[in-house]
Image (cartoon, helix red, strand yellow):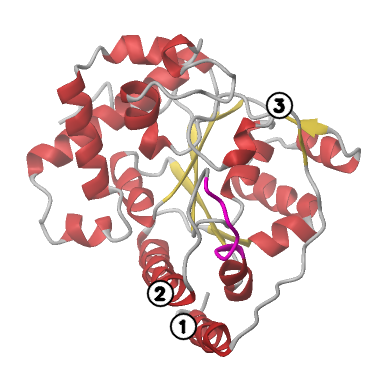
Amino acid sequence: MASAKENNFNNLPKIIYIMGTARSGSTILEILLENGKYAFGAGEVIHIPRDAFLKNNKCSCCNNCHDCNIWGQIYKKFCLSENELTNWINIQKQIDSHFGEIKLLSGLISKQNIAKYKKLNLQLIKYIYQETGCSFLIDSSKYAGRAFAMDKIAPGHVFTICLTRSPAGLLHTFQKPNKSEQKPKKPISVLMYYIVSLSALKLASLTLKNRPLYMTYEELIKSPINSMEKIEKWYGLDLINTKIKIMQKGFFTAKHIVTGNRLRKQKKIQFKSSLGEYKLKGAEKRIVLSIMIFWKKILNF
């Protein structure tokens, strides 16, 4: 188990955790938030052991992670072997999955793995703080299981944004070809994914100590300033610079995001508040859409 010193969060950053469905705008939201005062966007932290430390993928700063002035230093501090990293990655997969919460509550995860998860994730947060001095750490891992697990190991210190997309929007975007990131899904696959992920999000939302802030992709795109002000009020993160850039149609940069969609690879990112039309043709898509809308109503999302 982590020591009392490791559990002391008085001098460590608040964790703003973005959980939600895929293709719902988590990367662009993170980029907007990391431009706030004293904020650091770490990307999908669940994948840092795999993508930054083991695979040495490129950071959005254009350096390989081992050469990045943030992730490279953190990698050196951990000083873990390939086997130790692989073990960490496997533990993350178990606990941070859609229904990792059920696994934890039902005793399906060994106490040894829970202790390792806690120790390594607390160390990672501590090292990020040491290297950046941030007051707010943005984690866009999306998985509901991670929201629950992190809430348990850092009680009262995790603040969650539940970001979803309308059924029509999700069904539409999953039809787009996207070879470099997530492959297109057939309508029935989107339906199954939606049922599982939305159910997991609802379960996590009911058990988190700090009530999540609910937000939709459509709301973020149509009313970005209002969305930023909600987050400011909810979490105390100063987003004045972000709001000015949005209003002036300025450019954002993804600073040190390792895992996320292809947006992080662009050197200049301009926020666009226009929402495209969702075109869904065919009987199968209409039936799937009806079921998705029905499931959303059942869960009261």
Label 3: which residue?
267
Say which element carries label 2: helix
Q: Which is nearer the eye, 117 or 274?
A: 274
Residue 32 coordinates in the image, percent (x, y): 69, 39
Give the quadrant of residue 261: top right
Contact between marks 2 and 3 (CB within 8 A): the answer is no
Disc 2 from disc 3: Cα separation: 36 Å
Residue 52, image x and y in percent?
Answer: 40, 24
Residue occupying the point 35% across, 15% down:
75
* Relative horizontal placement of residue 248, taking residue 208 as reference (left or right): right
Question: Looking at numbered disc 3 in the image, what kind of residue is underneath it?
Answer: Lys
Kindly identify which residue carries mark 1: 295
Mark 2 lies on residue = 195
Q: Is residue 68 at least partly visible in the picture? A: yes
Q: Who's the residue at 45% across and 18% down the image?
A: 65
Quadrant into which the N terminus falls: top left
How far apart are the alpha carbons under marks 1 and 3?
Answer: 39 Å
